Amino acid sequence: MSEACGVSYDTLAWTQEWYVREETLREANTVLVNHHYKLELAKKFGGGTMSSSDGQRFPVRGKSLTARHMNIHGGRVPSTYTHVSDQWSTYGTKQIVPTTFLLTRLMWRS
C-alpha cells in the first residue's frame, strides 16, 4: 500500500492506529449520510425514511474466522449485511458469522 500511494509505511500505520477504528468510521459515515440526506438531489429518490437490507458474499483467500465454504460462491466467503436508505446512501454494514445462528439454535435446544 505504501508503494502504491507514495505514503510511508510508518505514516499509514500511525494513521490506522489512531484514526481507523470502528467508532471513528461509524461517526464519519453518520456525518456523510446526514449530509447526503439534506441534498436536493437525494430527496428526488426518496424521503430517507425507508430502507432496504441485503446480505452479500465476497470470496476471500486465506483463513477467516467469519467465512464459510460455499461452492456456489467459489470458495470461502464471509457474509456482509448492508442497509441502504431509499436515497441510496449506505448507513450500516455488519459482518455476520454464518454459524452464529446455528450455534444459538443448538444451545437453545439443549
Image (spheres, rainbow, N blue to C red):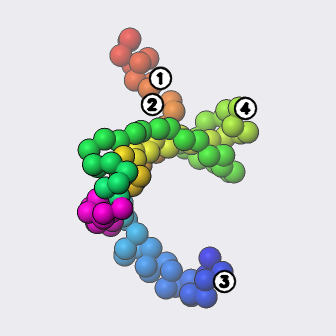
Q: Residue at x 50, y 38 (%)?
A: 55
Front-lying residue, 89 or 110? 89
Disc marking residue 100: 2
Q: Which residue is mark 1?
A: 102
**Magenta region:** 28-41
| Comparing labels 2 and 4, the label whose residue is closer to the camera | 4
Residue 30 in the image: state x and y as whole percent.
Answer: 29, 61
Per the image, label 4 sits on a secondary structure element best described as helix
* Image quarter in which the N terminus is found: bottom right
Which amino acid type corresponds to the residue marked 1 in the rendered image?
Answer: Leu
Which amino acid type corresponds to the residue marked 2 in the rendered image?
Answer: Thr
Labels 4 and 3: the sequence-earlier one: 3
Residue 14 in the image: state x and y as whole percent.
Answer: 44, 80
Q: Which residue is mark 4?
A: 71
Per the image, label 1 sits on a secondary structure element best described as helix
Contact, mark 1 vs mark 2 (Cβ under 8 Å): yes
Labels 4 and 1: the sequence-earlier one: 4
Mark 4 surroundings: few (<14), some (14-19) or many (≥20) residues within 10 A: few
Secondary structure, magenta segment, majority class: helix
The picture quadrant where one finds residue 25 is bottom left
Contact, mark 2 vs mark 4 (Cβ under 8 Å): no
Distance from Cα at disc 4 to Cα at disc 3: 35 Å
Disc marking residue 3: 3
Per the image, label 2 sits on a secondary structure element best described as helix
Distance from Cα at disc 1 to Cα at disc 2: 5 Å
